[in-house]
Image (cartoon, helix red, strand yellow):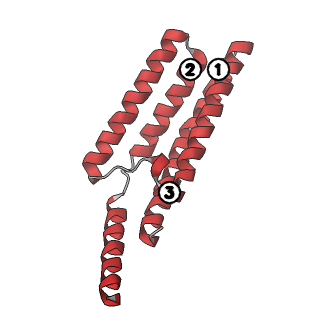
Amino acid sequence: MESKSAEDLAIIAAARAAVADRLITPMWYHPIFGLLLAGYVLGVSLGDTTARLITSLLFAAGCLALVSAYRRLTGVWVSGFEAGPASRWAKALGVLVGVLVAAGWAITYWTHLSWPAWCLAAVAFAAGIILGRRFDTALRAQLRSGL
C-alpha cells in the first residue's frame, strides 16, 4: 500500500513539474502588461470621466487578450490571485497600482500638473514587468516544490 502511495505522489510531482515547465511566459508578455498598467494609470489620472471609462475598458480588454494569448501558448492559465503563496506578488502589484491610480488622480485633480502622472505611469510599467516576472518565478518554484 505504501508503495502505491509513493508511486501516486511521484506521478503528482511529475505532473506539477511538467506544468511548471509549460508556464514559460513569453518575453513580450510583461512589457505589454506594463504598458497596459501605465496606460491605465495615465487615463485615470489625466482623463475626464469618459476617458477614464474608455481607459478602463481598454485595460480590461488588453488583459483579456493577454490571458487568451498566454492560454493559447501554454495551454494553461493560473489566476494571480488564486496561486497560493505566489499570489503575494500579484496582490502586491494590485495594491501598488491602486495606490498609483489614486495618487495620480489626486495629484492631477488638486495641482493640475500632468508630469507626476507620467512618473507614476513609469512606475506602473516597471512594476508590471518586475512583479510579473517575480510571480512567474515564484509560481514555477511553488509547483515544483509541491506547495
Tell me the residue at 47%/20% (across/down).
Answer: 55
Q: Earlier in the sequence, mark 1 or mark 2?
A: 2
Instruction: Mark 2: give few (<14), some (14-19) or many (20+) Cα within 10 Å.
Output: many
Residue 82's x, y, as percent? 46, 50
Question: What is the number of the mark on residue 84?
Answer: 3
Amino acid carrying mark 2 in the image: Val
Q: Residue 64 falls in which quadrant of the image?
A: top left
Q: Residue 33 falls in which quadrant of the image?
A: top left
Q: Is residue 119 left or right of residue 27?
A: right
Q: Is residue 128 left or right of residue 21?
A: right
Residue 147 against residue 6 in the figure, above or below? above
- Does residue 112 appear in the picture of this structure? no
- Asked if the residues shown at circle 1 and circle 2 are in contact, with their CB atoms under 8 angstroms apart, the answer is yes
Tell me the residue at 45%/44% (across/down).
Answer: 30
Q: Earlier in the sequence, mark 3 or mark 2?
A: 2
Residue 14 against residue 25 in the figure, above or below? below
Residue 35's x, y, as percent? 47, 34
Q: Is residue 6 left or right of residue 130?
A: left
Tell me the residue at 38%/31% (across/down).
Answer: 62
* Residue receiving disc 1: 105
Work out whether residue 140 or residue 3 is closer to the camera in this orientation and state it: 3
Residue 36's x, y, as percent? 46, 32
Instruction: Mark 3: give few (<14), some (14-19) or many (20+) Cα within 10 Å.
Output: some
Amino acid carrying mark 3 in the image: Gly
* Residue receiving disc 2: 44
Q: Which secondary structure, mark 2? A: helix
Q: CA distance from mark 1 to mark 2?
A: 6 Å
Amino acid carrying mark 1 in the image: Trp
Nearer the camera: disc 3 or disc 2 = 3
Q: Which secondary structure, mark 3? A: helix
Residue 40 against residue 16 in the figure, above or below? above
Q: CA distance from mark 3 to mark 2?
A: 31 Å
